[in-house]
Structures are given as structure tokens and as C-alpha cells.
Image (tube, helix red, strand yellow):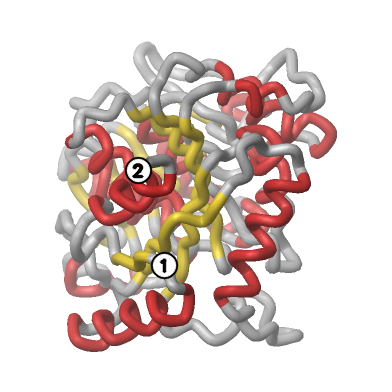
Amino acid sequence: MLDPTLPLAIYLEGALGLDFGKMGYGILRYSPNPVVCVIDSAHAGKSVCDVVNSPRNAPVVATLDEAIAMGARVVILGTAPSGGVIPDSWRPVIAQTIDWGLSLVNGLHEPLAPQFPALKPGQFIWDIRQEPKDLKPGSGAARFLTNRRILTVGTDMAVGKMTASLELQKSAKARGIDAAFLATGQIGISLSGAGVPLDAVRVDYASGAIEQETLKYKDREWVIVEGQGSLVHPGSTATLPLLRGSMPTDLILCVRAGQTHLTRSMDVPIPMPQLPALIRLYEDLATMSGNFPAAKVRGIAVNSGHMSNSDARSHIEAIADESGLTAVDTIRESADQLVDAILLGHS
């Protein structure tokens, strides 16, 4: 876990304002560390809040030199491009970061620590996407736990599953519920310091990795499992091992308001499924995977940050009407209503 006093620069070159800058946005929203700047030459001279809706502002600069002059000690690679591949255009900046004594947090698939073995005292490279050791295939053991295991699932990739999970944990803890957050992606792990980078785990061990992590929280009242991907997205394989590994008792469906087609599938545009059908799919698959008791979708977390307040309200109400479930934007409001829905489902 990062020392929370270390000043950060978030490298978002070419990504500020786009959905695959989500690691940077997550750091801005949830990290306790000071963020001295964001690096993106396309928006240099602006501030973050000039470009995106963010609860924390920071100046945008063009170069690493400027970030160092502002006091940055750690550079966060803040994007999540498709496939997690490091672009060749980043490599000179990465090398410069290490040569100039800054530390680096890397959430992409390619490990960087082996490429820079001679670090200065106190300098580090944190390659987050590393497969945990001593994994075994899943066995379904989590179904015998007596706590509540809440998994966030999605209509698509990058619809706010981590955000909904963290906001749900915050609301649950405010009610006095002993709620743990189980991170399954690079952003959540960078914030919590623990978890499973699921997309770095070989498929035979994926459900076992989630099961192994879930069992660590057997004494917690709630385990809120960060979802990944979507069952209906052709590029996603993460949801099934999450269902089988955590054996959730409850599901929260995450939706982007107004979305009509799946993202990152533009060669063959795929329409969004109807919510009742998708809810049944998630519930049926969770049940068929052996969950006990059978998992139910308790509510819907709506991502409406790209909309005005009035447009967001009308879309949230329409989603609630279509699904017949509680629907709420956990950032505009809170996750309190989702906590109520989970508690009601077990009353």
C-alpha cells in the first residue's frame, strides 16, 4: 500500500476525459495521497475539473519535468487501455521517471520492475497486476460462509463497479456494519493495498483466487466484492470466476445511464440487453453455480456523471421503473438506499 504522505503525479497522456482514464479518476476520488498534478499534454494549462467531473481538482501539465518541479514523488500510470498494454510512446517517460529517482505504480499487464533492477534507496516500482502465489482451482467453499457477500456486476465494462463497491462499503460502515472491500482490479488494489488482480490470473485458477481471498474475510459481516467486466461483453471473462469464487448472497447491478450499445465493440455494435433479462441471467447463473442461498440483484447503481441533474434523475427513475428495483447514483446521492435494499432482502 502506498505511503499516504507521498505526493503523486497521475500520468494520463491522451486519456484525460476518456473512459479508459479510470485508474486516474479512481485515484483522484479515493486516494488519501496528495495529487500534485495530472500529466496530459493535450489539456496542459487546464485543471482536471475543466475536463472531467472530479471531486478533487489538480493542475494539468504537459511534462514529467513540470510534475517533478511541483513536488511529485510517485508517478501513477493512470489509464486502463484495452488489453492493459503499455504504449511504446510511454516508454521514454517511464525510463525518465526511474532515472530521475521517482517511484512508479504500474497497473498494466507488462511488469516494469524487472526492466529497472537498479533502483535508488527508497525508490520502488509497484507492478500491481501480478498473479498471487500458491493458487488452486475453486472448490465452492465460499458458499458455506455465514456472512453476506455482495458482488457488483455490470451491464458493460467501465460502468462504475469499483465506485459502487467503495460507496456501498462507506454507507454500510456508517450504519455500523463491519464491511470489507475485496479489490479485484488494479485501481482497487492500489487504494486498499490488498486483493486479487483478476485479469492477471490464469483462467484455471481465477475462481480459486477469488475464493481464497473471500475466505480471508470469513469473520466480517459483509464482504463487498469489486466486480469486473460483464457477462454480455465479448471481451470480458471476469464475471464468471467472480460469481463462482465469492458465491455472492447479493448482487448490485451497475449501469451507465443512457447507454444504448456496449463499449469497445464498435466493429459489431451490440445493443444493451433489457435490464429484466440481464438481471435474470445474473441471478440464474449465480444460482446454477451453487450459491446458497440463491443470490438476488438487490438494487442498481447508476453511473450518471456525464449528465445534468435533471437528465440523470429522469434516467434513474426510468431504470427503477424498468427493473422494479431501487436505483441510485451513489456519487450524486449515496449508497444508503442500496444498503437498505440488501438489509430488506434478508429481513
Q: Quadrant of the C terminus?
A: top left
* Residue farthest toward the right in the current orientation of the protein: 204
Looking at the rendered structure, the secondary structure element under dot 1 is loop
Judging by the rendered image, the residue that carries numbered circle 2 is 343
Q: Residue 159, position in %: x, y? A: 47, 64
Residue 116 on image: x %, y %: 57, 26
**147 lies left or right of 274:** left
State how far apart marks 1 and 2 are (Cα): 14 Å
Q: Which amino acid does label 1 sit on?
A: Leu
123 over 150 or under it: above or below: above
Q: Are circles 1 and 2 on residues that touch, CB within 8 Å?
A: no
For the image, the number of numbered tags is 2
Q: Residue at x 41, y 25 (%)?
A: 193
Residue drawn at x 39%, y 58% is: 12
Q: In the image, 10: left or right of 313? A: right
Whether residue 157 is visible to the viewer of this picture, yes or no, is yes
Circle 2 — which element?
helix
Classify residue 247 by image quadrant.
top right
Residue bearing mark 1: 325
> Is 7 rendered above or below residue 316?
above
Picture coordinates of residue 29 (x, y %)? 25, 50
Nearer to us in this view, 209 or 176: 176
Location of the N terminus (image quadrant): top left
Q: How crowded is mark 2: few (under 14 residues within 10 Å), some or many (20 or more)?
A: few
Q: Report the front residue among 155 and 229.
A: 155
Q: Where is residue 292 in the image (x, y as percent from the top left)?
A: 65, 35
